[in-house]
Amino acid sequence: MKIKNFYLVTFAVISFSMVAEELKWGVSLGYEKIDYGITLENTDPGTSSSDIVLANTVKKGSMSYGALALGFDMKYGDHSFSVKSASGDSDDLMPGTDYPFTGWSHTDTNDRSETSFNYSYKLNNNWSVALGLYEGENEMEFTNNRTVETPYSNLYFWSDSEIGMQEATSEGAYVAAVYQNQISNKLFWYGKIGYQESTFDISQKYVYGEQATATQAWLDLGGTQASLVSNFVGGTGLYEWDVAYEVETEGSAAVVGLGLVYVLTPTDTITLGYERKNYSYDSGEVTNYTYAGKSEGNLDNFGTIDDATTGTTFDEEADYITLTYRHQF
């Protein structure tokens, strides 16, 4: 990914320029309790039926999970540079019913990772400014199901499914002001407030399937599921499509934080911190929407929807409670 490559190049340049100087460096290991939420809202009744959620609809999802966070930092004079990476997993981010649309059921499993690179400059004993880059990614494996009655027969209905993967990635740059002060010889507190500009990309690839399923009326007539589907092209009654869908948007976030630092030894500290991020993204641009039949009977059903639009806006929020041990070498 381009931002991760930039991270590594920046880190290498700064490290190399400091190698001849006296510097301090440290490593940290932490545990994060993260409460994450997302709100999808579509208030534009003019958007296409391909939208993420239907017009005049609000859908909310949330998950709580724990994550291990690994960090590395360097300090030279009033300058410091750090990198932190955290990852965790959780089930059921989005609602289990009426998502993505009315009448559907939904299940999902999620793997979420975050990486941040931070540079800070100490203005005086209390104040410092920080600049950084951030990337968060959520990989969701999902299954959606619904049943659809046929208007022309009471002998069968369609069992529809969507099974696939969604990747949601946010990337951005931020600036923050940090204040710290001493409470006692070994205890310090800090607070920070910041602003972040971000992009938010959603990419979905899934298999959409329609399975003809026998009703009780068909079974009462002596029929079976096998005898029903034998009447369809291919003899299975199953029609599937590969679907790819991508949306890009951008927005901004406010970041606030508060924490305590306890000095165990001159080289060891423990930090208890709280941080909250609120992201707000505009309705995005559909950059790709393709479908392709993959079953006997629909192989010629493929194409690209060039005029697909989205009126869905995205709001993310995340609360972090972190306990971190750091050792300085």
Image (cartoon, rainbow, N blue to C red):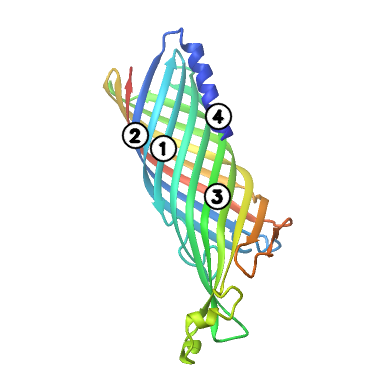
Task: Give the mark nearest the N terminus, 2 or 4.
Answer: 4
Which residue is most to the bottom? 221
Whether pointer 2 and pointer 4 mark residues with C-beta atoms closer than 8 Å, the reply is no
Q: Rounded to the nearest whole Å, what is the CA distance between mark 1 and mark 2?
A: 9 Å
What type is the residue that disc 4 sits on? Asn
Q: Which residue is mark 2?
A: 30
Task: Give the mark nearest the N terminus, 1 or 2.
Answer: 2
Label 3 packing within 10 angstroms: few (<14), some (14-19), many (20+): some
Q: Nearer the viewer, mark 3 or mark 2?
A: 2
Q: Rounded to the nearest whole Å, what is the CA distance between mark 2 and mark 4?
A: 24 Å
Whether pointer 1 and pointer 4 mark residues with C-beta atoms closer than 8 Å, the reply is no
Q: What secondary structure is found at the residue carrying circle 2?
A: strand
Q: Which residue is mark 1?
A: 86
Q: Which residue is mark 4?
A: 5
- Asked if residue 17 is positioned above or below residue 258 in the image, the reply reads above
Task: Give the mark nearest the N terminus, 3 or 1.
Answer: 1
**Where's residue 141, x and y in %?**
47, 54
Q: Nearer the viewer, mark 2 or mark 4?
A: 4
**Where's residue 275, x and y in %?**
43, 38
Q: The N terminus appears in which quarter of the rendering?
A: top right
Q: Which residue is mark 3?
A: 315
